[in-house]
Amino acid sequence: MNLPSLSTLSLSLDQGIAEIRLNRPDKSNAMNDAMWQEIRQAADWVDATPEVRVAILSGEGRNFCAGIDLAMLGGIQQRIAHPDGARSREMLRRLILDLQDCLSSIERCRKPVLAAIQGACVGGALDLVTCCDMRYAAADAVFSVKEIDLAMVADVGTLQRLPRLIGEGMARELAYTGRNVDAEEAAALGLVNRVFASPEALTATVREIAQTIAAKSPIAVRGLKEVMNYSRDHSVADGLNFVATWNAALLLSNDLNEAVTGQRERRIPRFSD
């Protein structure tokens, strides 16, 4: 098994748990060109590697992520330069769609991705964590939809995903004002599952949660993510129909037999990748 070679992320695998760490601590893990692409590369690797059952996404240093690197933002005009304005705008649209896809790869990944957040989580970083299955925060975490302060409309996922997490009214308040939300408020809003007193406690507990997930049936965990993502975006009737079809195809698995046998024999079941 070969880990992909990455310059802005560190990636490791231990006992079924992949750890993806944003690794530009001197820049507060600001997202430059390479990082956007490597997030997708890492997510695709997690998705495709049978030995990976769950992933943890975190940031090196004091801050989780300061959002898009301003140097990258400043270079966009040059990247889309063209004598024809229509072609220039088409290139910008394609660039935005590609950046959206880089983050959507986390949501698309069949394995659960748990975000462990300390310090700043602003702008593009908030777009990133809203793609994750669960979010956990240290007490010093700060969240904001920062794009409004750059005279921008957030365009890589926050405006679509955040209202589903915290409700339409609060999502609009944060988007229109750009104000900071501390960890306690983020938990009250439902943006994060839990808050921990220190980054160390955050890291330890998120890993415990990941270990619990990694011990479950991989095919059932992947099915849960698929069904829950589908149901979120469709009606209740559509979701029920989808899960019926899913289980008709995958319910009768070796994992089901192992789970039932393990309970009957009062032992921990062991599942293949």
Image (cartoon, grey):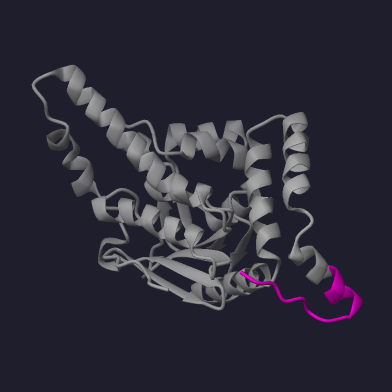
Residue at horizontal 40%, vertical 70%?
A: 11
| Residue situated in front as seen by the camera: 266 or 200 | 266
Tell me residue 173's x, y (percent): 52, 34
Tell me residue 144's x, y (percent): 44, 46
Disc tally is 0
Tell me residue 153's x, y (percent): 37, 31
Instruction: Tell me, yes or no, if residue 197 can be seen here.
Output: no
Q: Quadrant of residue 97?
A: top left
| Residue situated in front as seen by the camera: 207 or 175 | 207
Write down the region rendered in magenta: 260-273
Left or right of 259 on screen, residue 155: left
Tell me residue 270's x, y (percent): 72, 76
Residue at horizontal 29%, vertical 63%?
A: 8
Residue at horizontal 34%, vertical 39%?
A: 98
217 inside magenta stretch: no
Which quadrant holds the N terminus? bottom left
Residue at horizontal 44%, vertical 42%?
A: 179
Instruction: Tell me, yes or no, if residue 206 can be seen here.
Output: yes
Q: Quadrant of residue 176?
A: top left
Q: Quadrant of residue 43?
A: bottom left
Asked if 234 appears above or below 189 in the picture, the reply is: above
